[in-house]
Image: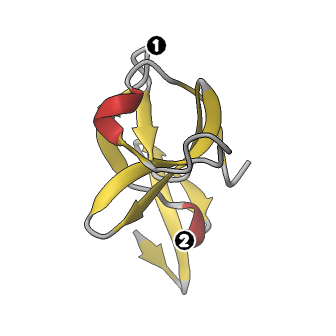
Amino acid sequence: KRKSGSYYLEVAEDVWKGVIPETICEFTGVLDANGKEIFEGDVVQCGTIGTIRFGEGRFFYDYTHPEDPEQLDMSEIKTGVVIGNIHD
């Protein structure tokens, strides 16, 4: 909800918390190995450590690995674990 030029999220009935718009990320529809929801911008450990990104109409696991520079599709990282996000 937007109030007076700022953004707020209702965290409980009539309790609002300020939100920085650039930190709002979309749920990918995938859960990690612990059952935690994976969002765009999350940092995930799945063999290597990578970041969840959105591009070309899909979410993907973006990481740098010298032997396998490809990006992984989200369905391939269900064994991974969310360890943070790019905004923390």
Kindly identify which residue carries mark 1: 34
**42 up-or-down from 26: above or below:** above
Q: What colour scheme governs how the chains and residues are painted in the rendered image of this protein?
A: secondary structure
Q: Residue at x 43, y 18 (%)?
A: 79
In the rendered image, the quadrant that contains the N terminus is bottom left
Give residue 10's mark: none
Q: Where does residue 74 sit, x and y in percent of width and height?
A: 34, 40
* Residue sticking out furthest to the top: 34
Q: Where does residue 60 sit, x and y in percent of width and height?
A: 40, 50
Look at label 1 and name its amino acid. Asn
Q: In terms of image quadrants, where is residue 35? A: top left
Q: In terms of image quadrants, where is residue 76? A: top left
Q: Is residue 41 visible?
A: yes
How many other residues sit within 10 Å of disc 1, few (<14), some (14-19) or many (≥20)? few
* Residue sticking out furthest to the bottom: 5
Kindly identify which residue carries mark 2: 21
**45 up-or-down from 66: above or below:** above
Comparing 2 with 87, the one in front is 87
Q: Where does residue 49 sit, x and y in percent of width and height?
A: 65, 35
Tell me if 30 is positioned left or right of 43 in this view.
left
Comparing 24 with 4, the one in front is 24
Q: Residue at x 28, y 58 (%)?
A: 58
Tell me if 18 is positioned left or right of 29 in this view.
right
Q: In terms of image quadrants, where is residue 54? A: bottom left
Q: Residue at x 62, y 40 (%)?
A: 67
SS state under label 1: loop
Comparing 20 with 7, the one in front is 20
